[in-house]
């Protein structure tokens, strides 16, 4: 079945340093990849998404590129801000008679001054 | 805009009890989802539904039932609560045109 792997459970950074959160996936289908962000005491919300191979997608200073050859969709930002501290989920969806959406285990990003 | 409302916000149950969680959305979205959120395990799909009266099992459906009697509502039943179980259950609906999930605020379950 479909699966998403996020290898880091916790990433701690100093403000101003670059961010990279890893995401790899397995699926037998053509698919969409997503990053969702959940701030403390809030619901998860979409950060960015892509279905196009090798095309960079950007939103709110974050960017990711879907690489189907390596089944990866890593999230990056050039300079971390305190407000980026949150839980980040990578997810995929594909058509299996309905849009099943599968999430990874999540990476908590903590940015300190 | 729209909203997803989950009730109750907090649910305390006894071991072996059947517990029902409710979700309402006014987006008029077709597809709805139930996820369980546990620290370190991410969001695990329990059930989803692509239309009224449709139910599709996710990877974590054992121990749960679901019901979609109306397009706007999707309920989840824990068939037998496990002692010391603690988790957050998140409901979501999908905006097809944007391939985006919108989540409710969650129901936090504790079992004594």
Image (cartoon, grey):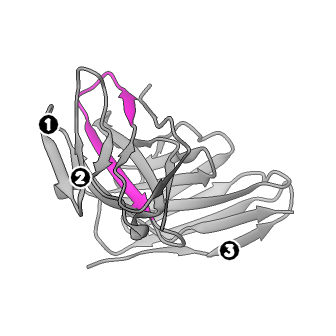
Point out the stretch of residues depicted in magenta.
A23-38
Q: Is residue B19 left or right of residue A22?
A: right
**Is residue B101 visible in the rendered structure shown here?**
no
Q: Residue beneath label 2, please?
A: B99
User: How far is the residue under mark 1 from the one under mark 2?
Assistant: 14 Å
Q: Residue beneath label 1, please?
A: A52
Residue depicted at x 30% and y 26%: A71
Q: Chain of mark 3?
A: B
Residue depicted at x 35% and y 25%: A27
Q: In the rendered image of this protein, does residue B108 appear above or below residue B35?
A: below
Residue A95, x across and y down, in percent: 28, 36
Graded by Cα atoms within 10 Å as few (under 14), some (14 to 19) or many (20 or more), the crowding at tag 3 reads: few
Q: Is residue B7 left or right of residue A102?
A: right
Residue B10, x across and y down, in percent: 68, 74
Q: Chain of mark 1?
A: A
Residue depicted at x 63% and y 51%: B38
Residue B70, x across and y down, in percent: 41, 65
Q: Chain of mark 2?
A: B
- The quarter of the picture where residue B1 lies is bottom left
Q: Residue beneath label 3, please?
A: B10
């Amino acid at each position: 079945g479909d699966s998403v792997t996020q290898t880091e459970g916790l990433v701690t950074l100093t403000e101003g340093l670059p961010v990279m959160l890893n995401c790899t996936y397995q699926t037998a289908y053509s698919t969409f990849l997503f990053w969702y962000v959940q701030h403390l005491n809030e619901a998860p919300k979409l950060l960015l998404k892509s279905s196009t191979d090798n095309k960079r997608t950007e939103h709110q200073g974050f960017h990711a590129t879907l690489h189907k050859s390596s089944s990866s969709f890593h999230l990056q930002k050039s300079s971390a801000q305190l407000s980026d501290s949150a839980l980040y989920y990578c997810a995929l969806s594909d058509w299996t008679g309905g849009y099943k959406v599968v999430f990874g285990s999540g990476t908590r990003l903590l940015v300190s001054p | 805009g729209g909203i997803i409302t989950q009730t109750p916000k907090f649910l305390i149950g006894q071991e072996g009890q059947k517990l029902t969680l409710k979700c309402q959305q006014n987006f008029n979205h077709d597809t709805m989802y139930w996820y369980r959120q546990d620290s370190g395990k991410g969001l695990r799909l329990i059930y989803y539904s692509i239309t009224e009266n449709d139910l599709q099992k996710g990877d974590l459906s054992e121990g749960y039932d679901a019901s979609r009697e109306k397009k706007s509502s999707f309920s989840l039943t824990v068939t037998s609560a496990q002692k010391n179980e603690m988790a957050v259950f998140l409901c979501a609906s999908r905006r097809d045109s944007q391939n985006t999930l919108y989540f409710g605020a969650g129901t936090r379950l504790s079992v004594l």
